[in-house]
Image (cartoon, rainbow, N blue to C red):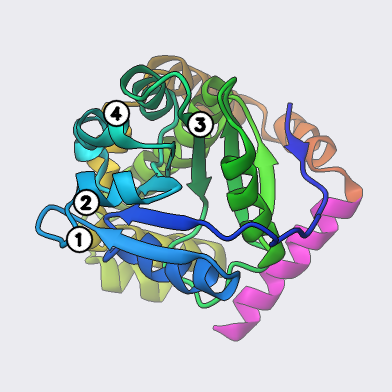
Amino acid sequence: MLRYWAVTLTGENSMIINIVGGSGIMGSVHKPIFEKSGHRVITSGRNSNPSIKEAAKQSDITIISVPIDATEEIIKEIGPYCKAIVDFTSLKEFPVAAMLKYSDKKCEVAGLHPLYGEVKSIKNKPIIYCKTERSGQMCQELINCLKDNGAEIIEMSTKDHDKEVLSLNQALRIKEVAAYIKTITGGSLSVEEMYKIAPPPTKAIIELCARQINENNDDMYVEMIKRDKYMKSTEDKFLDNFKQVGKNYKKIASELRNSFGLKFLREMQEKAEKNIEKN
């Protein structure tokens, strides 16, 4: 069940925000946003001055924005020094569990997942908020800041996030798109040649694959796939649906139209048509 937060602006309480891994994309996107809202931002890393421990000690709230495979190690290292700690990881169950485990019982804890990359504005961009029993005033002030800058905050449990967002919405898509392109280009034609003869929807999938296989994403996607604890059930469901579509396309298509709902279906069809016309 998703819970959407109404936009409420406060901005009264200025904080010192420490972004561990702040030189990366998430740090570059959010540092000016936090500063615009009146907060002071420290970006820390392995070789920074102050160190990640000192930055955590000096800050009101620390944001973990490091590669997935380094997330728990960093949390363990600086958790005891934090007054409040949140993360920007693509997974939520293990980082939130680690933050609760390695931080003081009085330390505020929450999980955040910005569902975007390098953007100029976070207006209308979704951010998943996994609240815990220790989410408090500083976590809420951070949420208020993000909402103040136009982000759409969607509250979910860590389990629902990793099942619905990670496994179904990300890991499955990563594998599905890559496998599809590898399959259709497994014959005598190159990807470029296949693109030339492809209908517009297939062209869109090939373009999506090209974007997806940017080498900067490789390590993150490997970790996402490796840590997808719902992978077996997701793949079983996908393969079963794949077979059902082949057996009775019209029935499945009708069910899908009902799933979309008339208004949203028309909206998505219009967007698809506009994207096709651009090409």
Assess disc 2: are there few (<14), some (14-19) or many (≥20) residues with their C-alpha within 10 Å of its C-alpha.
Answer: few
Question: 159 or 27: which is nearer to us?
Answer: 27
Whether residue 179 is visible, yes or no, is yes
Assess disc 3: are there few (<14), some (14-19) or many (≥20) residues with their C-alpha within 10 Å of its C-alpha.
Answer: many
- Which numbered circle lies on residue 18? none
Secondary structure beneath dot 4 equals helix
CB atoms of marks 3 and 2 within 8 Å? no
Which amino acid, by three-letter code, is at mark 4?
Answer: Pro
Task: Please name the residue shown 60% across and 24% down the image.
Answer: 157
Residue at mark 3 to residue at mark 2: CA–CA distance = 32 Å
Labels 4 and 3: the sequence-earlier one: 4
Q: Which residues are magenta?
A: 263-279
Task: Please name the residue shown 57% across and 42% down the image.
Answer: 139
Residue at mark 2 to residue at mark 1: CA–CA distance = 5 Å
Residue at mark 4 to residue at mark 3: CA–CA distance = 12 Å
Secondary structure beneath dot 1 equals helix
Question: 171 or 50: which is nearer to us?
Answer: 50
Marks 4, 2: nearer the viewer? 4
- From the top left corner, tell me how far across and down residue 106 is, in percent: 48, 23
Q: Name the residue tied to disc 4.
A: 80
Q: Name the residue tied to disc 1.
A: 215
- From the top left corner, tell me how far across and down residue 76 is, in percent: 23, 28
Classify 261 as above or below 101: below
Residue at mark 4 to residue at mark 2: CA–CA distance = 32 Å
Q: Name the residue tied to disc 2.
A: 218
Apparent side of residue 67 relative to residue 150 in the rendered image (left or right): left
Task: Please name the residue shown 21% across and 44% down the image.
Answer: 53
Labels 1 and 4: the sequence-earlier one: 4
Secondary structure beneath dot 2 equals helix
- Which numbered circle lies on residue 108? 3
Q: Residue furthest right?
A: 262
Classify 141 as above or below 27: above
